Amino acid sequence: MKFRKTLVFMLVLFVGAFMFSSPAVAKKAPSLEKWKPDFDPKGAKYKCIVSNVSTPALVGTFAGFQIRDELWKRTGGKIYIDFKPYSILGGEVEVLNMVQMGAVQGMGVSSVASTNLGPRFGIVNLPFLVDSFEKLDKFISNKKLFNHFLMAMDHQGITGLDITGYGNYGWATTEPVKTIADAKKIKFRIAEAAVNQLSYRNWGFNPVSMPWPDVQVSLKQGVITGLDHTPAVCNLTKKFEVAKHFTQLNYAQGLFIWIFNKGWLMSLPSDLRETFIATVHDVCAENRKATAKWEMENIDASKAGGVQFYKLSDAEMGILKDQSKGTYEKYAGEINKIYPGDKYKPANYLKEVQDFLK
């Protein structure tokens, strides 16, 4: 216990040093001025630092500020969420460790990075399973399956509460990709996630795993010539300034899973804990309603800015789906694994989700 407290203390010092001690970092960090709350948070009895890797211009990331404001209102100013987007606290793998240790209380972690501590979360990264807004809504509507999904990090001392989205995954590239043969010439950046890495290897492509904050420079320098992400994210984070082509593969939904340190959450008085959980659920549900329209608006804006959009033929999409079977077989065991804290104990969780989403 003493060792754990020492680690937490060291992490807190690291976060503080990262945020406040380096003038170079401070100058480069994006301003949060436009996102400031219209209330004074100093009087809050409980403070919760929540991280996210991306910009609040993403509808799914903006949920962090929406949760902050709604929670302040519902608790009468007793809980303040200090939301830090833009990778201010570092990359997702770093922050996941901070959340586990309690140095940071929560984060909106991308589904692709979430598997580092919760392999079950990888079910939404499997190619061509939860691959549309309609299937995502259907998955969430099944509380038995969805709640089991949210328990993916419980054994790590982390509670999953809900999700928001950022669109459909595809390929932003510096050269047109209209065929599988074209894709094999691209050096794709993918997230630091084992499920995604295996999918790309099964497809016969050339993936490079790197943290999101490194992508912009790497793309400009030609270290990578494409990236695996959603069109809205590529538009809003200016990846389309270099990668002027996008192939709409739509093989998975981009999700942020809102996770929190279980110990911190349980330390709240029961009434405030219930309000906290209900607020996250309500805000995420409303936020998801805007995602499909928001994605289409960004696609239209990207096309107007000169980005070319493509789709693979049905035959080639069939090839990728067939090659994806190996990813399912590899990770079925990890996704289906049952942990002591699980309330639902299905014999084959992956198959249940597959059958439900047919």
Image: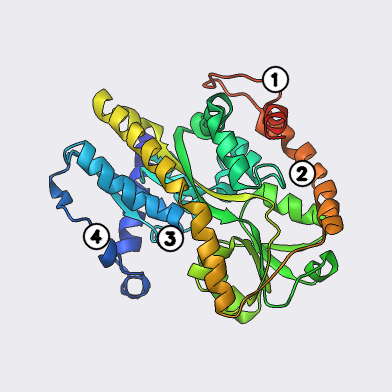
Secondary structure of the residue carrying numbered label 1: loop
Q: Are marks 1 and 4 in contact (CB under 8 Å)?
A: no
How crowded is the residue under tag 4: few (<14 C-alpha within 10 Å), some, or many (20+)? few
Q: Would you name the residue on which mark 4 appears?
A: 36
On the image, the x and y values in percent for residue 190 come to 65, 60
Callout count: 4
Amino acid type shown at disc 1: Ala
- Residue under the image location 34 percent in, 32 percent down: 278
Nearer the camera: disc 3 or disc 1: 1
Q: Would you name the residue on which mark 2 appears?
A: 327
Secondary structure of the residue carrying numbered label 4: loop
Compare residues 41 and 4 and report the one nearer the observer: 41
Q: Would you name the residue on which mark 3 appears?
A: 87
Q: Would you name the residue on which mark 1 appears?
A: 347
Picture quarter with the C terminus: top right
Amino acid type shown at disc 3: Ser
Name which quarter of the figure residue 285 lies in: top left
Amino acid type shown at disc 2: Thr
Query: Is residue 150 visible to us here?
Result: yes
Compare residues 353 and 107 and report the one nearer the observer: 353
Q: Distance from label 1 to label 2 (Cα)? A: 19 Å
Mark sitting earlier along the chain (1/2)? 2
Amino acid type shown at disc 4: Lys
Q: Do the residues labelled 1 and 2 touch (CB within 8 Å)?
A: no
Q: Are marks 3 and 1 in contact (CB under 8 Å)?
A: no
User: Going by the image, does 135 lie left or right of 106?
Assistant: right
Mark sitting earlier along the chain (4/2)? 4
On the image, the x and y values in percent for residue 134 come to 60, 43
User: Going by the image, does 2 lie left or right of 317?
Assistant: left
Q: Residue 105 carries which label?
A: none
